[in-house]
Amino acid sequence: MYRNRGSLGGNYIETMSCRWGTELWDQFDNLEKHTHWGIEFVERYTKFVKERSEIEISYAKQIRNLSKKYQLKKNSREEDEYKYTSCRAFLMTLNELNDYAGQHEVIAENLTTHIICELTRYIQDLKAERKSHFHDGRRAQQHIENSWKQLESSKRRFERDCKEADRAQQYFDKIDADINVTKADVEKARQQAQMKHQVAEDSKNEYISYLQKFNKEQNEHYYTLIPHIFQKIQEMEEKRIERVGESMKTYAEVDRKVLPIVGKCLDGMTNAAASIQPKMDTKQVVESYKSGFEPPGDVEFEDYSMSMRRTVSESSYLNSRGEGKPSRSNSRGKLWPFIKRNKLSLKLGSGPEDCSHLPPEQRRKKLHAKIIDINKEIQKEIDQRDALTKMREVYIKNPHMGDPNSLDPRLEEINQNIDKLQLDARKHEAWLLEVETRLTEQGDPQRRQSGFYDSQATTPVNNNCAPVNRESPDGSYTEDHSTEHHLKSRSTEFDDDFDDDDPLPTIGTCKSLYPFEGQNEGTISMAEGELLYVIEEDKGDGWTRVRRNQDEEGYVPTSYIKVFFDTNAKGAMTYI
């Protein structure tokens, strides 16, 4: 900082020119106030950075909580939403936002480490250094003040002694001129005057000595000591100012260092927005909600003005009340396409294992997803089996490492699990083949025109692809008393469509493949091989309405029967 400090003499004075030691030699108190203000300024700036750090931490916490609040929760219905590109983009945005919050935490951490902690320690050192410098200044000031007091004391003593010597001289002159005064008194006065003059001379010499000493000390004080002390104070102040500047620069660099990562977060959000594909999302809606049913045909005109038997076309979706019977005001038919087909399945909760409560297309997707999950479980079990098998081989080769027979129970358990999962997979694959076959048949225009059957004979339309099992033929239905309320609601729901006094016409016959105990309200029991009349076909919910006689009718599982539709029957409808 200095070109040449030199000695504490003249060279130092030249070096200190235009500095606090020479320019502000008489401003000790003001310098003390200024340096005190400088420390307070550093403390205030430190407090500012600390509050900024707290704001960053609070902001990062709020951003993280916001991101966590809208994150996908496991085992929630929101999981289905993320098959859409817009929802996946939103999830990516939340992840980027979480990383963005992390950068604000980095800012807070760097501000605390590189500025707040450093300045806090520096302020303590600065206070100690300032105290030391001003202590030296006060001590030098006290020394020069004491020297000045000694000079003033010697000066007053010299003045007093001179006045006394003058008075003694005047008294001697007066006595010496008086002829009446004895010679002894004159001699005494002369000696007194000489003594006073000698005292005055000694006081003079002392005063001169103190004066020379004070001038020397004053010169050293104002040209050596004070400039030296003030120069240290100036250097301290310059370092303080420089340190504040470095802290402000660090303050900006802390933000600048995270800008590239923040930019990547923002780029990630932009890329997430660019990944949204509206057409794919609308296609996904089709994949999610497509039922696989065919649209209804035209409704034919029903002429009530003619005295002939009322007929209803096969393509009509109006529920018939019988032949030749006028419809009543409370028995107006409903169009099936506008009825919620899955109402029963929603009431039944998860539905049967074969997903027969779902529309064909949705059933196919559900079964396909289940097969994928089962295969994953099978592969997981196989991997565990392979790992245990290798471990068993190691135990056989190295008996000291473990007993190979201890792994046999676990291997047996895994093999049983694999067999069970494989059986479950084959069962679901059979159901999937069944529904895919039906969808293929519905997609065939020629088969749709013929109603899937020959016009001259009755043919079975519902075959269960699973092996015969009297207790649970294909896993598609297991009677549960908890469904009683929902079957009751189904029966009451459709009771509005039919007149209680007029039985529904038969649209075919069916043969029971398995026995069924209709214990729930709205169902009817049947024995294996029993023949029943079909009065309402399956609407996609897994139930078919049948009649045993004029007074006994109800619903039975569609998978428990083989249906033979009468193609000549009026009101016959085909959904299978």
Image (cartoon, rainbow, N blue to C red):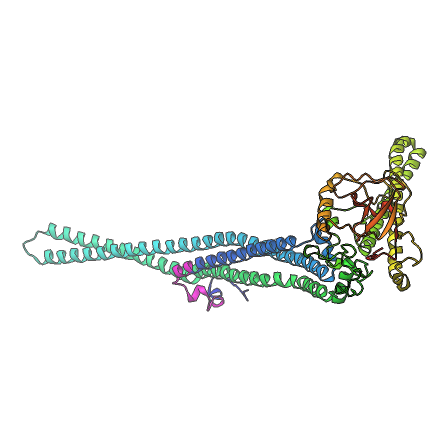
Instruction: Decide whether residue 223 is among the magenta residues.
Output: no
Q: Is residue 433 visible?
A: yes
Secondary structure of the magenta portion, mostly? helix
| 172 sits left or right of 295 in the view | left
Magenta segment: 14-33
Image coordinates for residue 266, horizontal then vertical, percent: 67, 64
Is residue 401 visible in the rendered image? The answer is no
Q: Nearer the viewer, residue 22 or 180?
A: 22
- On screen, residue 419 versus residue 129, left or right, reads right
* Residue 282, picture quadrant: bottom right
- Picture coordinates of residue 67, whole percent (x, y): 65, 55
Residue 534, percent across and down?
83, 49
Left or right: 79 as drawn, with respect to 133 = right
Quadrant in the rendering for residue 511: top right
Residue 288, horizontal then vertical, whole percent: 77, 58
- The total of numbered circles placed on residues is 0
Q: Nearer the viewer, residue 358 or 448?
A: 448
- In depth, the one of 538 and 530 nearer the eye is 530
Nearer to the camera, 296 or 540: 296
The residue drawn where x is 31% and y is 58% is 208
